[in-house]
Image: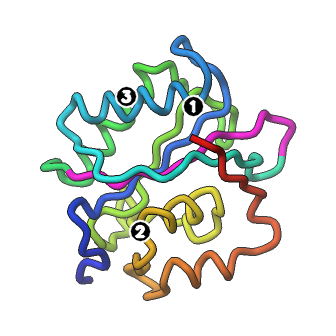
Amino acid sequence: MSASWAGEGGIFIALGANLPSELGTPRETLQETLRRLQSAGVAVVARSPWYASEPVPPSDQPWFVNGVAEVSSELAAEPLLALMHEIEADLGRVRRERWEARVVDLDLIDYRGQASDGALELPHPRMAERSFVLRPMGDIAPSWIHPVTGKAIADLIAALPPDAGEVKKLTD
């Protein structure tokens, strides 16, 4: 399928955290995450505002801080995802259970409009159900089109189900 985004980077990463790390608050950890991506040669083209979002699925965990960054990289999708997992581990992420509280979570949302359903599914298979991904992505890529469904981001946001989770834009 052809690219759905004509921006400089065209690669979108969702960032989230709801536990403090050795570096400080979830927001401080996410800011350090962006610095580490840049130090590894991944240029941050744009970053959304930070959002506070309730856990999905609902739980008694603390709310998350979430955002989306558009990046540019020479890395292919799989090596980029491996780098993202390496940064998560370096910042203290330990994967035990699905949807658990975490110090950092990085998801590859879209890689230059590629559509694949192999080991790395692109675009991210649950992005269209997640207000904590769509709303910040809409801030930095208002003309983005889902490469599989052909739906505009504004339409995806409008179609979010009531149980998609509450999100609130934070002041930077």
Q: How many marks do you count on the picture?
A: 3
Specify which label sits upstream in the sequence, 3 or 1. 1
Residue type beneath disc 2: Ala
Rendering coords of residue 143 (x, y %): 40, 79
Seen as rendered, the residue at the extreme front is 171
Q: Which mark is residue 87?
A: 3
User: What secondary structure is the stretch in magenta mostly built from?
Assistant: strand
Residue type beneath disc 1: Arg
Viewport quadrant of the C terminus? top right
Asked if residue 151 is among those painted magenta in the image, a careful observer would answer no
- Judged by depth in the image, the label closer to the viewer, 3 or 1, is 1
Packing grade of label 2 (10 A; few <14, some 14-19, many >=20) is many
- Judged by depth in the image, the label closer to the viewer, 3 or 2, is 2
Packing grade of label 3 (10 A; few <14, some 14-19, many >=20) is many
Specify which label sits upstream in the sequence, 1 or 2. 1
Q: Which mark is residue 141?
A: 2
Q: Determine which quarter of the picture holds residue 111.
A: bottom left
Residue range (magenta): 59-72
Q: In whole angstroms, how far apart are the C-alphas of marks 3 and 1? A: 15 Å
Residue type beneath disc 3: Ile
Viewport quadrant of the N terminus? bottom left
Q: In whole angstroms, how far apart are the C-alphas of marks 3 and 2? A: 25 Å
Q: In whole angstroms, how far apart are the C-alphas of marks 1 and 2? A: 21 Å
Asked if residue 63 is among those painted magenta in the image, a careful observer would answer yes
